[in-house]
Amino acid sequence: MAVSLTQMLAPTANQEAARQAARSLGNLLHQTPTYTAFLGLVEAVNVDPTVQQLAGQMRTHQAALQMGREPDQHAAALARVEAEVEALPVVQEYRQAEAAARRLFQVVDALISQEAGVAFAANAQRSGCGCDG
Amino acid sequence: MTVDPREDRHVDTTLQLPAALHEAARTLGEALRTDNYVSAYREANARAEADAAATGLEQQLASLYEDLLARQQAGETLSQEQRTAFYSLRRQVQTQPSLVARDEALAQLKPVFADLAGEISAALEVDYTALAR
């Protein structure tokens, strides 16, 4: 008996189980204090007026650099503004939260990869050449 | 190409995951392990690793690449002979049947991983792979 296209394209039970497991993992990660703290700081950085003002200055210098206008001056000014942004307490807090979230995600990913026998996140990126290493 | 789950990266092995999260990561890893594409890749990878001639060529290419890169970074201009030797060796590697089979199997597995990572990212509202690598 011929197999219909719908049957061929339908996910197998195993693929559906993997999909379900991925959703469940995403929801659990979302609920961790580490991740909620990270999301909170993303929001805090996005609404911080000083960050926004400095980000505007950065965009001005980047645009000038792209157009090749006074590259030395704009490159130096951009580096100064970037350093100013990084020194802001809210940005420093964000960096710490980001590092903690990365540590958590990397441990989770190492566990998935170990069980699967293949590196998961490294092979799950949609774009890029995938030629790392 | 990153395929080894034990790849050298800084994973905080002291970080204890909450039990539910640990279990969810393990469940996803197990589901991946039994996926047809993952099985096919692991078999192809095992065959490639057992092919001494192919792995020898691959190691030779990696060493030559490192050497030429170091020379370039030191300011040396590579000769035509050096370039020709590199491209010739790379062609040999790219046409080794066991390596071609492994790379094709990996290419087929990547969209499956990307879809599943997409499920995690949808729950998180950020790109899982960006934080997990």
Image (cartoon, grey):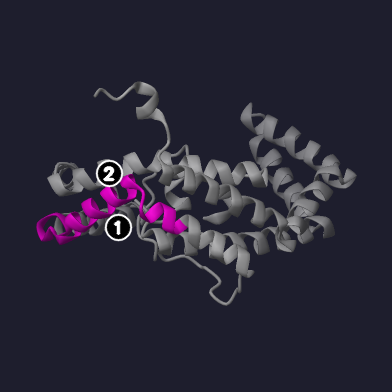
Q: Quadrant of residue A90?
A: bottom right
Q: Residues within 10 Å of mark 1 (few under 14, many from 20)?
A: few
Residue A8's spot in the image, x, y percent?
35, 28
Residue A81's spot in the image, x, y percent?
77, 47
The chain holding disc 1 is B
Q: Residues within 10 Å of mark 2 (few under 14, many from 20)?
A: many
**What amino acid is found at the position of numbered circle 2 in the picture?**
Ala
Q: Is residue B32 found inside the magenta-colored segment of the image?
A: yes
Q: Is residue B51 visible?
A: yes
Q: Is residue B129 visible?
A: no
Label annotation for residue B66: 1
Secondary structure found at label 1: helix
Examine the residues drawn in magenta and state their main secondary structure. Answer: helix
Residue A13 shown left or right of residue B40 in the figure: right
Question: At 19% across and 59% down in the image, what residue appears?
Answer: B49
Residue B36 shown left or right of residue A127 in the figure: left
Label annotation for residue A50: none
Q: Is residue A90 found inside the magenta-colored segment of the image?
A: no
Residue B92's spot in the image, x, y percent?
13, 45
Instruction: Name the residue beneath numbered marker 2.
Output: B105
Secondary structure found at label 2: helix
What range of the chain is rendered magenta? B29-55
Whether B52 is drawn above or below A65: the answer is below
Asked whether A88 or B113 is in front, the reply is B113
Quadrant containing the C terminus of chain A in the rendered view: bottom left
Asked whether A84 or A112 is in front, the reply is A112
CA gap, disc 2 and disc 1: 27 Å
Question: At 77% across and 60% down in the image, what residue appears?
Answer: A92
